[in-house]
């Protein structure tokens, strides 16, 4: 049985981490910590476990096996490294950190402590994405040439626990980056995993097009990102992330192969459509992808607990998390320099 403490009691903890630990027969919630003690108390009342006064109390609790970090981006590395050094396994939300130096320090702490460090990139666990990877790996429609992926919604002020224009997502010193780190990084990780290749060339434009604070000034981070990514093998495509989609949330991907295409969440009636260049079309149906308004089991917690119980490597490693951070930082650099960045 794995006893897990949750650090950070915002929406991701309330809607995913805590319910998924609660529903896992091999896990017990040891307790919660949040800088807002009231939030931690509410979580304790809803899901059980104690309220910790600070992170140090968690680290000193010998009954805690694992720490789930769902706090703001700026403290991910601080809490993760401290937890690993205290002998706890760590699940950290994305982005794992806001600098590569912090990513490296987290990985080094994991190796030194011989404890699991897993990053919460949930799109790998979506059934339709798992099926798509099976199709790609089988090469039944040839090799991947290019891709197109989009993740867009109304913005974190509609999702975060602080549903206002004062949310920490809009503050650079806390978030580090905007939509690129919030939504774009999900797609970077998904694509790396689907095509089994790293990105080495980035050309991006990021901007704050619409989001404003209550005083009318533009937020400190970008609300839109338009990125062209090229991999080691020459696979090339576009990744779009936006907080200014005020219609229906979009979370779709198209993989273009030598023998056809794989369309993921592009059709309201079917989750996967495989079209061959001969004109044949096959549909594969599974559960719909999660949205801010429709929460289902992400699979992340189950995978994390499974790795601890079995002593196996995590499905999304610290290295995976670092590579995704590396790409989104390159997107920001490319936009700032207005030129291609080669990694």
Image (cartoon, rainbow, N blue to C red):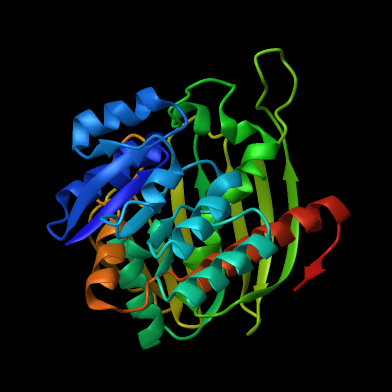
Q: Position of residue 249 (x, y in %)?
A: 44, 39
87, above or below 259, in the image = above
Query: How many numbered discs, if any?
Result: 0
Q: Residue at x 44, y 71 (%)?
A: 261
Query: Is 340 in front, or is 92?
Result: 92
Q: Position of residue 150 (x, y in %)?
A: 53, 52
Query: Is 156 in front, or is 37?
Result: 37
**Res. 306 visible in picture:** yes
Q: Residue at x 21, y 29 (%)?
A: 45
Query: Is 245 in front, or is 315?
Result: 315
336 left or right of 224 in image: right
Quadrant of image for the N terminus: bottom left
**Res. 296 visible in picture:** no
Q: Position of residue 311 (x, y in %)?
A: 28, 78
106 left or right of 299 in image: right
94 left or right of 238 in image: left
Q: Quadrant of residue 159?
A: top left
Quadrant of image for the C terminus: bottom right
Q: Residue at x 71, y 32 (%)?
A: 209
Q: Residue at x 73, y 66 (%)?
A: 202
Outermost residue to the top: 215
Q: Position of residue 153 (x, y in %)?
A: 49, 37
200 left or right of 189 in image: right
């Amino acid at each position: 049985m794995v006893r897990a403490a949750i650090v950070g009691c915002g929406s991701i903890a309330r809607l995913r981490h805590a319910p998924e630990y609660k529903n896992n027969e091999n896990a017990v919630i040891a307790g919660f910590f949040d800088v807002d003690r009231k939030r931690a108390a509410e979580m304790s009342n809803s899901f059980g476990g104690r309220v910790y006064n600070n992170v140090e109390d968690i680290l000193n609790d010998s009954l805690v096996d694992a720490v789930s970090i769902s706090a703001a981006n700026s403290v991910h590395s601080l809490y993760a490294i401290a937890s690993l050094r205290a002998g706890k396994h760590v699940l950290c939300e994305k982005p794992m950190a806001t600098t590569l130096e912090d990513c490296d320090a987290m990985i080094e702490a994991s190796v030194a402590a011989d404890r699991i460090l897993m990053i919460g990139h949930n799109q790998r666990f979506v059934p339709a994405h798992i099926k798509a990877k099976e199709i790609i790996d089988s090469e039944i429609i040839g090799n991947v040439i290019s891709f197109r992926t989009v993740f867009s919604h109304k913005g974190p002020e509609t999702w975060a626990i602080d549903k206002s224009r004062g949310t920490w997502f809009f503050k650079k010193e806390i978030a580090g980056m905007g939509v690129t780190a919030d939504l774009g990084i999900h797609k970077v990780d998904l694509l790396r995993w689907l095509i089994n290749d790293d990105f080495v060339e980035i050309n991006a434009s990021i901007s704050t097009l619409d989001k404003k604070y209550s005083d009318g000034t533009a937020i400190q981070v970008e609300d839109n990102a338009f990125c062209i990514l090229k991999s080691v093998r020459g696979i090339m495509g576009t990744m779009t992330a936006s907080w200014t989609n005020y219609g229906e949330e979009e979370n779709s991907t198209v993989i273009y192969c030598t023998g056809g295409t794989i369309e993921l969440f592009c059709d309201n009636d079917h989750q996967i459509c495989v079209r061959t260049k001969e004109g044949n079309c096959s549909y594969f149906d599974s559960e719909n992808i999660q949205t801010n308004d429709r929460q289902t089991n992400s699979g992340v917690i189950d995978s994390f607990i499974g790795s601890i119980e079995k002593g196996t490597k995590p499905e999304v490693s610290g290295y995976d998390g670092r590579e995704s951070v590396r790409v989104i930082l390159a997107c920001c650099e490319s936009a700032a320099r207005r030129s291609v960045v080669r990694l």
